[in-house]
Amino acid sequence: MKDINLPSNSKMLAQDFLFGVATSSFQIEGDRKGRLDNIWDTFCEKEGTISDSTNGDVACDHIALWREDVALIEALGVDAYRLSISWPRVMKQDGTVNEVGMQFYVNLVNDVIKRGMKVFVTLYHWDLPQYLEDNGGWLNRDTAYAFAKYAEAVAKVLGDKVYSFATLNEPFCSAYLGYEAGIHAPGKTGMANGRQAAHHLLLAHGLALKVINRLSPTSQNGIVLNFSNCHTTTNSEEDKRAAKLADDYHNQWYLQPIIEGKYPDVIDMLDADSKPEILEGDMEIISQPIDYLGINYYTRTLYQSDGKGWFEIVPPSNKVLTAMGWEITPDAFTDLLVELNERYDLPPIYITENGAAMDDTLDNSEVIDDARTAYFHTHLNAVNDAIEKGVDVRGYFAWSLMDNFEWALGYSKRFGIVYVDYDTQKRTLKQSALAYSKLVKSRINRYISGIK
Ligand code: FCB
């Protein structure tokens, strides 16, 4: 078995640094009958949207198997579990709480806590109730207010239990992939849609954060954003400018409003009809202080100029790629964290997702996924390097606990450290899970012998 090692003096081996695993509701839960439909149910029913024509009806059957799954997480020895709540499972269309759905999460959260782990709850990991989409979804400002109501219902029940709330997971994906590029649910397209959805998502974050801070003042309340460094393959000034525009458009668009209360300058380049409608007071709501920033990181992205003053994506230049076709760029991860830290006045950071899809095979009850273990090794060390350079990172979550529904790619891509046989729902720890667990458990001896 390959190991994951950190330098023996790493701050990440101290007792207060959290190691965890992450999942999301639609990707693992199944039990569609137990909740209202969401935009992914509808999207999956459309021809040609999901590469293997699958859906989330069963997924990892987590609603039935959650006790075993929590026991598995505990057995890994991690400190925390990051999960998301399915909005259409806990809220009815009339705005009242679905008690059965809510109770599922109460039981789940209680059990994780009982086993000595902290719970990081994400309120929105992309599964918007379909009835809201029918009224425009994130293009409709009312959705932001509906989100705050949903957040209130959850915070009332879970507020005294969870360690952390995140309002949104990766609003970039919801807005850009879902409403601009059309490759995620609900499959809408166009810049005007994408920018408006992004603004309403950020507004939803701000409105919900206010409610959560009031009802759950002791938890760590923040948001989870994804970042991908925007690099060029040439040294041309035009390409560098294009990469900077891409960075503003895809990355800073979500962080700058939260930290500084304004969108990046690239907004001024948009046609009048592509600019989002921003009402008075919105930016103040969006830019309330957050207790922490969750960062999801997988890879860098390459760009060049499109010759018309804008940017276009370029295929990877590296030969070694993950099964997603993504470059493996741990140094860029360190750079990203250091650059964000230098540029903004940031709160503490949690790495809320990091991991890799690989072409796994289950052989004799074993999955020898050395490439994934190596990915974790280099990326954990990249986080360590960033900490050494002054970035305040407090925790790291591996994506994902187990293989699951990878959105438009269905079940064809496996990100888990635990292998899921979708025919039997049997879970098998991959070698990367064993290595991650070994690293996490190695800390115990240090605490006992007093090295901190
Ligand atoms: C992130 C998502 C997560 C998963 C990973 C691979 O963008 O938050 O649900 O799909 O990518």
Image (tube, rainbow, N blue to C red):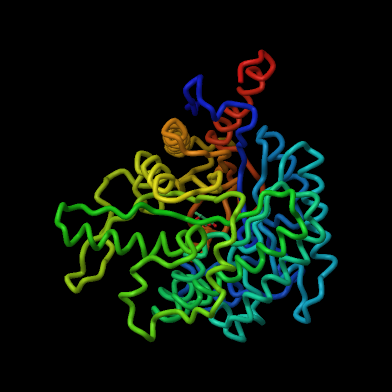
At a point 53% along the width and 38% down the height, the residue shown is 367
Q: On the rendered image, what quadrant is the C terminus found in? A: top right
Residue 420 seen in render: no
At a point 62% along the width and 72% down the height, the residue shown is 128
At a point 64% along the width and 57% down the height, the residue shown is 122
The answer to which of 153 and 279 lies nearer the viewer is 279
Image position, residue 25 (x, y; %): 65, 59
In the rendered image of this protein, does residue 285 appear above or below residue 73?
below
Residue 369 seen in render: yes
In the rendered image of this protein, does residue 364 appear above or below residue 402?
above
The answer to which of 386 and 260 lies nearer the viewer is 260
- 323 to the left or right of 400: left
The answer to which of 93 and 60 lies nearer the viewer is 93
Image position, residue 161 (x, y; %): 79, 49
Q: Quadrant of residue 91?
A: bottom right
Image position, residue 312 (x, y; %): 26, 66
In the rendered image of this protein, does residue 367 appear above or below residue 293?
above
At a point 44% along the width and 38% down the height, the residue shown is 379
**Residue sitting farthest toward the left:** 236
The answer to which of 128 and 255 lies nearer the viewer is 255
Q: Quadrant of residue 202?
A: bottom right
Image position, residue 423 (x, y; %): 63, 55
- 47 to the left or right of 130: left
- 180 to the left or right of 414: left
